[in-house]
Image (tube, rainbow, N blue to C red):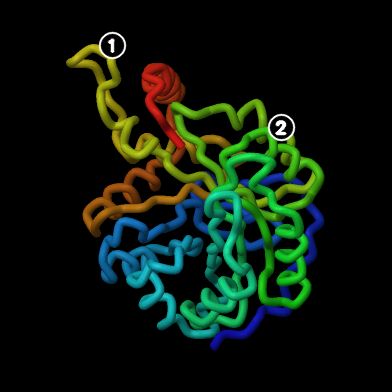
Amino acid sequence: MSVVPNNLPSVESTGPVIDSFQETIFGSLQRKVLRLGFSASYRPGVETVRRALDAGVQVFFAYGFDSQMIRVLREITPSRRQELVYVTGAYQLLGRHPNLRRTLEKRLRHLGTDYIDCFLFLGVMSERGMLAGVLEELQRFREEGKVLAIGVSIHDRKLAGDLAARGAIQTLMMRYNAAHRGAEQDIFPRLAAHGPGVIGYTATRWTALLRHPRGWPKDGRVPTPGMCYRFVLSNPHVHICLTAPRNLREFEENLSAFREGLLDPADMAFMRDFGVAVHAQRRWFM
């Protein structure tokens, strides 16, 4: 089992502190981390998770069923553990949530750690999803030292902005991509006061940004996955963008693209135009 770090620096700055395109200081944890995070939701293989560690990835998002990631993270030594950021949580289901403490204890046991860096209430769709006492109970976990930062994974942008503005959370996980840019108006301007750590996911809009939308020229340009990640990370308000590769090859391609850095103005303009076309399809999207 690992040991809770007792030498975390105090939080003096607000808002994101960007050292470079590839690294950032992550929220209230005040730890320098690589901005490409990792999820094993598509079961990319144990060797891919290990490769992510070798490549310097530090932020790992895990569900309870991520057996491949859990297997690798349980091998981490206590000294290495303090370099990593484990993000997990309890999922809201049909307007209710599981026993939060029981879920936390399961995650601690599964991951072989004494603390979770970021423990989130996942899948919040609206104000109704913020059930009475949820944030209070998460805060108790933080006071006990079992969790270093609490937060939400959320689809309601107005609620997300409100939570961030009043300092109710230390971590905010949300969708942000070239087709879904509402956070630029509803969330990002409200982060400065308390500077929560921001994690973006679905950079490819579940692959919709990798296909021709209706009305797009058949021979017209289509983004690569790497361009989608670079679009997200070209926004300095996003600390971490999660990649969820299906195999080692996809991870290597995403890592290589990430290392190319900021999108140039022409590619950024293209991504925004393409995102508008994808969003205009108005297919169901959660």
119 versus 13 height, above or below = below
Q: Which residue is mark 1?
A: 215
Per the image, label 1 sits on a secondary structure element best described as loop
Q: Is residue 266 visible?
A: no
Give the image location of residue 128, x and y in percent. 67, 43
Per the image, label 2 sits on a secondary structure element best described as helix
Farthest residue, direction left:
219
Q: Residues within 10 Å of mark 1 (few under 14, many from 20)?
A: few
Give the image location of residue 228, x and y in percent. 39, 36
Residue 149, image quadrant: bottom right
Q: Is residue 276 left or right of residue 128?
A: left
Q: CA distance from mark 2 to mark 1?
A: 33 Å
172 versus 272 height, above or below = below
Q: Which mark is residue 52?
A: none
What residue is rendered at 67% in x and 71% in y? 147
What residue is rendered at 34% in x and 67% in y? 49
What residue is rendered at 56% in x and 63% in y? 89
Give the image location of residue 222, x and y in percent. 27, 25
Q: Which residue is mark 2?
A: 189
Q: Amino acid at mark 1?
A: Gly
Give the image location of residue 31, x and y in percent. 63, 63
Q: Amino acid at mark 2?
A: Pro
Between 258 and 209, which is closer to the camera in this rendering? 209
